[in-house]
Amino acid sequence: MEFIKMDSIFRKAPKASCGTETARICMPTWRNFARRTWRCGFYEAEDVLLEIDDVDLIPLDMAWGARIDEYWLRTPLYYDVSRKFIFANPGLKKIRLNRTYDVFVAALKTLWDLPYINAIEQWRDYCNVSICWIDELWVSSIADYKYWLHALSQFDYVFVGLHGTASALSQAIGQPCHWLPGGVDALRFSPFPDPPPRVIDVYSIGRRYDGIHSKLLTEAGKSHFFYVHDTHANIANTDVCDYGQHRNMFANFAKRSRFFVVAAAKMDSPEEVQGQVEIGHRYFEGAAAGTIMIGDAPDCESYRELFGWPEAVLRVHPDGSNIRTVLAEAGSDPERMAAISRRNTREALLRHDWVYRWNEMFRVAGIQPSPHKEARERLLIEMADLAASAGTNVTGTA
């Protein structure tokens, strides 16, 4: 399909904008000062909204001495019976809007980000509809924020990224809370239209089971097995130089990998999840890159709804006892591997791109979608058609 343009796929991230005349959406971002690795995917989501709609992206930034101010403000937040500190500015440079907007969107990676919006003075007076999207909030953590939760009432619509949290948060705040799962820039992660050689045998990033990792290290000691994995103890909490470059590098590794390790969200933090089972962002990224995902197929509603196609994940025991068998059986059947790869890529392109999450948010909020989104949606369909018709070489090595 020669009509797919490479520059439409490998594009630069949209530039932040502020104060444009035509924007109908106001969205603050903290990408200038909050640069931890685990935040990068959500900044990617913001970029997709910039591409498909008319948005003023308001880049907030820390004022001089803000880190100290933030520490002294946040410390009493957990014990603030006055319930007022949550509306204070945690040391950011103040911003005042100079025009009205149809929609205000606060995309929070965690509820910890909520005070940042207070840097925009009287934002509610300038925005007709307000939306808060909290990507990660566990049911067990809701009680920790008991002096914060009333601040969510300033939003007309509240969304949360964990399926099991939506009902509990609704009860806690006394208003409907909607489930809106994570996603991926499926165009960035897709191996199409020109699939590169899959020179990495197994790629593992983020949380992992020690048993699986140990078995893969043993395989990596052999001459023809390339295992790429994290070597930092807590790489998610390191700062990146540029979030867009980080996502590009991650995507380039993923779409050059045959197998990709996935696990339920925070599976190694039982004290935090308290039995709540959810999928993590690795599933969206691994599928979009056309990898053969290996690891957990979580027993939860979100997994069944979002990844309900055949062999979305090849199950591997947490102790890694069957990993050699899983890799050998899949690797000995190129046609099966190609079918899994094509299917994962296609389903991600049709289901899990960030454009679909923004569409669902605006549908719930009764906001008319922008016609700008249609170009991206057409490209996603074209790429999905490419994936469906690809040959067995999509999982090949160099």
Image: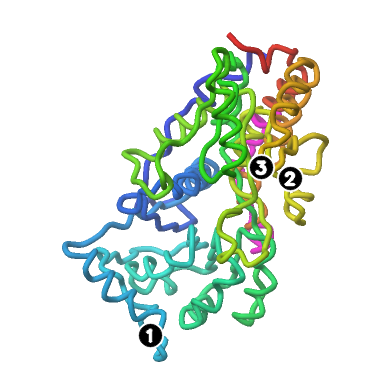
Tell me the residue that label 2 is attached to.
Answer: 297
Q: Identify the mark nearer the N-term, 3 or 2.
A: 2
Q: Residue 210 versus residue 297: which sits nearer the camera?
A: 210
Tell me the residue that label 3 is attached to.
Answer: 319
Tell me the residue that label 1 is attached to.
Answer: 84
Residue 388 place in picture, x, y as percent: 77, 23
| Whole-number angstrom distance, CA of label 3 to CA of label 2 | 15 Å
Q: Which residues are magenta?
A: 362-381
Q: Residues within 10 Å of mark 3 (few under 14, many from 20)?
A: some
Q: Residue 286 versus residue 319: which sits nearer the camera?
A: 319
Of the residues shown, which amino acid type is indicated by label 1?
Answer: Lys
In the figure, is residue 104 to the left or right of 381?
Answer: left
Q: Residue 191 versus residue 16: which sits nearer the camera?
A: 191
Magenta stretch: residue 366 in it? yes
Residue 258 place in picture, x, y as percent: 63, 23
Residue 9 place in picture, x, y as percent: 54, 26
Looking at the rendered image, the disc whose residue lies closer to the viewer, 1 or 3, is 3
Residue 391 place in picture, x, y as percent: 75, 13
In the figure, is residue 130 to the left or right of 334?
Answer: left
- The residue that appears at 46% across and 36% down in the rendered structure is 230
